[in-house]
């Protein structure tokens, strides 16, 4: 857990502005209402999950087809800790073909169901670009996806999640 690093990623990369941006763009046109933003992100965005993971894949390694799960946690916000849940996966690519990594693309299979072989003709492939962030829904809305095999070099990725305010359950005490 690294709350400081998670906060720096959230604030200093422009991610907070992207996710929580104002209601108007620079030309004064309405972009997205707070309600629309809350619907898109699955709740009121709070920041990044402090459980930062750094993945390293070497030649021949891959991450097979899977779904990312949503998690509940408590963010150590001041003055009061905030109940939160994760709704979107955040991947930050640290390598690309320019750094010697070949392969390792992230492929999504939007029409596939658990237990079925992915339909290759409908895949969405995201190539590696150093410094590029990839956001995708997880939990119940997650698409089947994989990290393809690295064919040369190394693939490095920072992985965390966008956290939103967790509403109190109607079944809670």
Image (cartoon, helix red, strand yellow):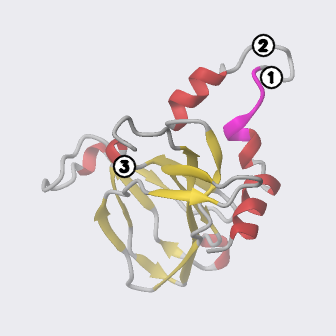
Residue drawn at the location 29% of the way across and 63% of the way down: 65
Residue 100 placement (x, y as % from top left)? 61, 79
Q: Residues within 10 Å of mark 3 (few under 14, many from 20)?
A: some
* Residue 28, picture quadrant: top right
Residue 105 x/y as whole percent? 46, 63
Q: Looking at the image, do the residues carrying marks 2 and 1 touch, with CB atoms under 8 Å apart?
A: yes
Q: Give the magenta-colored segment's residue range.
A: 18-23
The residue carrying mark 2 is 29
* Circles 3 and 2: CB atoms closer than 8 Å: no
Label 2, label 1: how far apart the Cα atoms are = 6 Å
Identified at 80% across, 23% down, the residue is 25
- Whether 133 is among the magenta residues is no
Q: Position of residue 40 (x, y in %)?
A: 52, 31
Would you say residue 21 sits in the magenta stretch? yes
Measure the alpha-carbon separation of dots 3 and 2: 32 Å
The dot on residue 25 is 1
Q: Residue furthest top?
A: 29
Q: Name the residue beneath numbered marker 3.
A: 139
Indicate the quadrant containing the C terminus: top left, top right, bottom left or bottom right. top left
């Amino acid at each position: 857990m690294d709350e400081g690093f998670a906060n720096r990623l959230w604030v200093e990369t422009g991610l907070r502005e992207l996710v929580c941006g104002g209601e108007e763009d620079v030309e004064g046109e309405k972009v997205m209402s707070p309600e629309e933003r809350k619907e898109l992100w699955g709740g009121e965005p709070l920041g990044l999950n402090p459980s930062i993971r750094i993945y390293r894949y070497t030649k021949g390694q891959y991450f097979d087809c899977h779904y990312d799960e949503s998690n509940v946690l408590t963010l150590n916000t001041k003055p009061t800790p905030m109940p939160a849940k994760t709704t979107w996966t955040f991947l930050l690519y640290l390598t690309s073909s320019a750094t010697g990594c070949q392969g390792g693309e992230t492929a999504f299979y939007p029409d596939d169901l658990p237990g079925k072989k992915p339909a290759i003709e409908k895949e969405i492939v995201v190539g590696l670009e150093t410094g590029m962030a990839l956001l995708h829904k997880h939990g119940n809305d997650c698409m089947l996806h994989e990290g393809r095999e690295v064919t040369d070099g190394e693939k490095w990725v920072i992985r965390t999640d966008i956290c939103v305010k967790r509403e109190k359950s109607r079944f809670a005490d």
